[in-house]
Amino acid sequence: MKILIIEDEKLIADSLKKGLEQRKFSVDTAYNGKDGYLLAQQFEYDVIILDLMLPDIQGEEICQKLRKDKIDTYILMLTAKKQIDDIVSGLNHGADDYLTKPFEFSELLARIRALIRRTSENKENILYTSCIKLYLDKEKVFIGSKEIKLTKKEFMILEYFLRNKGQVLSRNQILEHAWDRNVDIFTNVVDTHIKNLRRKLGKRNSTIEAVYGSGYRIKDDK
Ligand code: CA
């Protein structure tokens, strides 16, 4: 899952990025409203964490502009103000949820997961095929009853496949989804990670297949 953080307090933005990356999200950051707005227009994110008080464009305005642009990415507004009026106003401008500062990281994480679940057909925290089970909250993967140890990137790639079962995902889509925007798009990291992922899942259980000239897909064997 890919997240954009728009937050001018660098310390907060950077520590959130670090925390979320540890929890297997890929994260881009913008330290002002203008950059954040451009990134949100340019790339596809699953959730945008948007600070309300920014030095240039205010969070509410960004929210409103994105909705006008027909970008319907979930927006979680961060606000230092606890006044109910600000919260109501944020929601009225198109935000999906809000959190008042200071907040606990665990609450932010739970709210991000709840937002992502809204679009998912599967309301549980589990993604699966007939032999693979991926637990989003515990960050664990099982083949039958056996746990498979995956790296952060392998987990993120498998999660992306499982959310898009049956669909062919191009190398670029996978790259954009599981890496941040600083990645070199001319590398073959995607193929390397998928090769390792297939090896770990085991030949018999790996339903990830290469689609010649297009990318990869996981077979939907449900
Ligand atoms: Ca701020």
Image: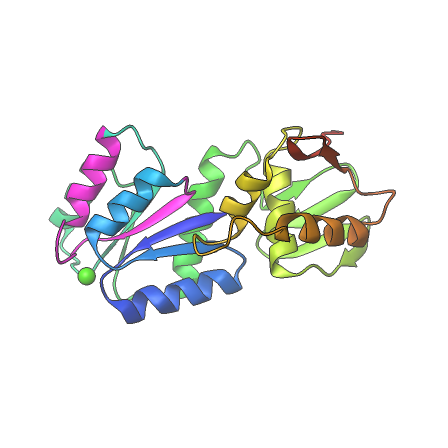
Taking the magenta stretch, the answer to whether it contains residue 111 is no
Q: Between residues 186 and 112, which one lies in front from this camera angle?
A: 186
User: Which residue, as the protein is rendered here, is positioned at the far right?
Assistant: 204
Image location (x, y in percent) of residue 164: 60, 34
Residue 104: in sight, yes or no? no
Image location (x, y in percent) of residue 115: 42, 43
Relative horizontal placement of residue 88, taking residue 214 as reference (left or right) = left
The colour style of the image is: rainbow
Residue at 73% in and 51% down: 197
The span picked out in magenta is: 44-68
Residue 161: in sight, yes or no? yes
Taking the magenta stretch, the answer to whether it contains residue 65 is yes
Ligand 1's image quarter is bottom left
Q: Quadrant of residue 163?
A: top right
Q: Quadrant of the C terminus?
A: top right
Q: Quadrant of residue 80?
A: bottom left
Relative horizontal placement of residue 187, taking residue 91 as reference (left or right) = right
User: Which residue, as the protein is rendered here, is positioned at the far front?
Assistant: 186
Q: Quadrant of residue 167?
A: top right
Image location (x, y in percent) of residue 182: 44, 56
User: Which residue, as the protein is rendered here, is positioned at the far bottom?
Assistant: 11
Residue at 76% in and 57% down: 148
Image location (x, y in percent) of residue 207: 77, 37
Residue at 57% in and 55% down: 137
